[in-house]
Amino acid sequence: LYLAQMCRKAGVSYNASVWEIEMLDWIDEHLDFYKIGSGDLTAWPILQVFAKKNKPILLSTGLSTLQEVVDTVAFIQSVNPSYEDPNMLCLLQCTSMYPIPLSDANLNVMTTYRNETGLSVGYSDHTSNFEVSLAAVGMGAKFIEKHFTLSQCLPGPDHKASLEPDELKSMVKAIRNLELAMGDGQKFPQ
C-alpha cells in the first residue's frame, strides 16, 4: 500500500494486477480500474467478483483463442451489463512471451476484437522497443501497456521487453504527438 499511497501523493495513477480475490479487498481502494492478466481470462469465478465491483476492466488476451475472448466478454457482460460500454471493458491484444519478435505482435487482432465485440481495444506490448505501441495507437488502441525497468541488463526475460526510464518518456511523448496528428476526423478546408 505504501507504493499506491506514494503514487497518489505524486499525482500518478497506481495499478496492480490482482491474482487472488483475498487481495482485492486489501488493495481495491487504490485501484481506479482492474487489469486482468492473460492467465486469468478464463477464470470466470474471479472475473465474476471483479465485474460485480463495476470498475473499468482491461482484459489481457495473450493466452487465449478468439472464442475464449468472446465467451469471456459475454460472461462478464452477463454478470454486469455496464461492461457493454466500451469505456468499461477494453480488450488488450497480447502475445505472452518476453520479448516477442515484431512478427508476433499481430496488431490486426485489435480490429478483430473491435468488430466482434464493439468494445475498446488496446495493446500489451512485449516487444523490445516501442514502435509497435505507436502503430497500435494509430490503429485506435485506447490503452497501451508497456513494462519498464531500470535496466534491460537485469536478469529475467521481462527486462528485455521493458523500456528504461528515458525510453519510456520518449514513448509517451511520441504517443502524445501521434494523438495530436490523428486529429478529430472532421474534414474541412485548411
Image (spheres, rainbow, N blue to C red):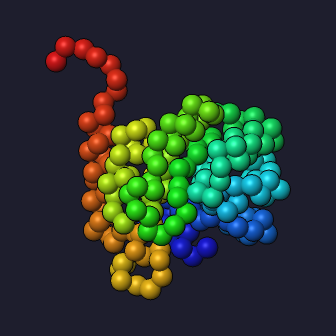
Total labels: the figure holds: 0
- Please determine whether, in this image, residue 14 is positioned above or below residue 85: below
Picture coordinates of residue 123, whole percent (x, y): 48, 51
**Residue drawn at (71%, 47%) of the image:** 68
Return the residue found at the far bottom: 155
User: Which residue appears at 27% of the width and 51% of the height?
Assistant: 174
Q: Quadrant of the N terminus?
A: bottom right
Q: Position of residue 11 (x, y in %)?
A: 44, 60
Q: Is residue 156 left or right of residue 72?
A: left
Q: Nearest the camera: 45 or 101? A: 101
Q: Is residue 154 left or right of residue 60?
A: left
Name the one closer to the observer, 86 or 125. 125
Q: Can you say whether 133 is above or below 139 in the image?
A: below
Residue found farthest to the front? 103
Q: Quadrant of the C terminus?
A: top left
Q: Residue at x 34, y 49 (%)?
A: 134
Q: Residue 125's quadrant in the figure?
A: bottom left
Location of residue 60 in the rendering, given as x and y in whole percent from the top left corner: 59, 54
Q: Is residue 12 above or below residue 117?
A: below
Residue 42, visible in the rendered structure: yes
Identify the image quadrant of residue 91: top right
User: x, y percentage for residue 38?
Assistant: 63, 59
Q: Is residue 142 visible?
A: no
Residue drawn 70% across and 60% down?
A: 40
Q: Is residue 148 toward the left or the right of residue 110 in the image?
A: left
Judge left or right: residue 171 versus residue 36: left
Residue farthest to the top? Answer: 189
